[in-house]
Image (cartoon, helix red, strand yellow):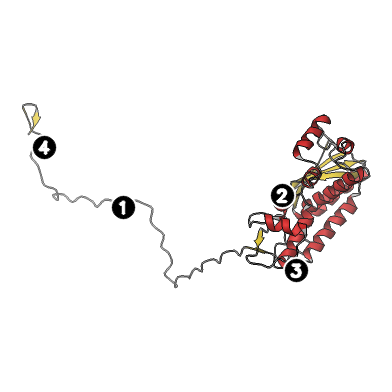
Amino acid sequence: MSGLRDPLDLDRVGHDLLAHALTLCGREEFTGELRVAGAPGGTLHLRNGLVVGAQSPGAPGPEALLLRSGRVSGEEWAALVRESGGARWPAARLIARGYAGAAQLKVVCVMALHDAVFAVLAGRVHGCERGAETEPFATIAVGETSNRLLQEGTRRLAALAALPHPVHPERERPHPVPGMDAGPLTALHRELLTHADGRSTARDLAFRTGRGVYTVTVEMARMLGEGLLECAVAPTPIPVRPLPDGQGVRQRDPSPPTAPPLVPGSLPRRKPGGFFRMRNGAPK
């Protein structure tokens, strides 16, 4: 399967490391942040041992999902943040101004939470470290257990790996197939065909379109199978013919050549003082 390390595309050592850290947080009813170092890594927010939020550089956060939906503009968002005293997630003001309902914001936060965990599991986990909660960010009212989150993340990876043309969220960079007959397309398909340029990964397209990275990765894989997208073929390496036996490349001697020894009598003799003979202060 192209682009996947194994059927689950799972860093099993990192998965076990994260699972152990989350289990301890749940057992101790920890409240704070669990910072996951890795690629892309991320931060999980816990309250009394339950995960109430997550963010990762590998997945759009709830604010990106909401802004790209068109329900609120960038200028309106900035005004809401100012009115909320600089809050990163001005949920109360969003509801009060009618930009979104409470149920919709909850759905957006849950989507962002699961998407961030998927991005963390699809990458590499190098370590976990606890920290104090500096600012609750787009949290959900009822937290989720670590087991449920990890099971959902691995289920998504398995579903992605089962597709005929699976891709990794941060690896393949497809582009539209030239001259293809697209036929009827969904809104997401049209967006991906517009933005796929051969340089953007599924993660890049998720941020660009304001969609979940899991959703974009799955649709990208399906479009590859349907012949709507294709990945550039790596250039074929130039074959190198081995030299016949005994004709290897000779090492160059880096030492400078030595001057031949002087042989007595090999140079012409000159008269003493004959090299420069001065006359009236000028050489003769």
Q: Which residue, given by chain and number where applicable, does mark 3 sit on?
A: 164
Disc 2 is placed on an element classified as helix
Earlier in the chain: of badge 3 and badge 1, it is 3
Q: Residues under labels 4 and 2: Cα distance?
A: 84 Å
**Quarter-of-image position of residue 274:** top left
- For label 4, the residue is 275
- The amino acid beneath tag 2 is Arg
Residue 1 visible in rendering: no
Q: Position of residue 15 (x, y in %)?
A: 81, 54
User: Mark 4, mark 3: which one is toward the viewer?
Assistant: 3
Q: Where is residue 17 in the image (x, y as percent from the top left)?
A: 81, 51
- What's the residue at 89%, 45% (across, down)? 106
Q: Give the farthest residue toward the front.
A: 184
Q: What residue type is labelled 1?
A: Pro
Q: Are marks 2 and 3 in contact (CB under 8 Å)?
A: no
- Where is mark 1, residue-wise? 257
Mark 4: which amino acid?
Answer: Phe
Out of 127 and 9, give the one closest to the viewer. Answer: 9
Taking the spot 80% from the left edge, 30% from the top edge, the residue there is 82
N-terminal-most mark, 1 or 4: 1
User: Label 3 amino acid?
Assistant: Pro
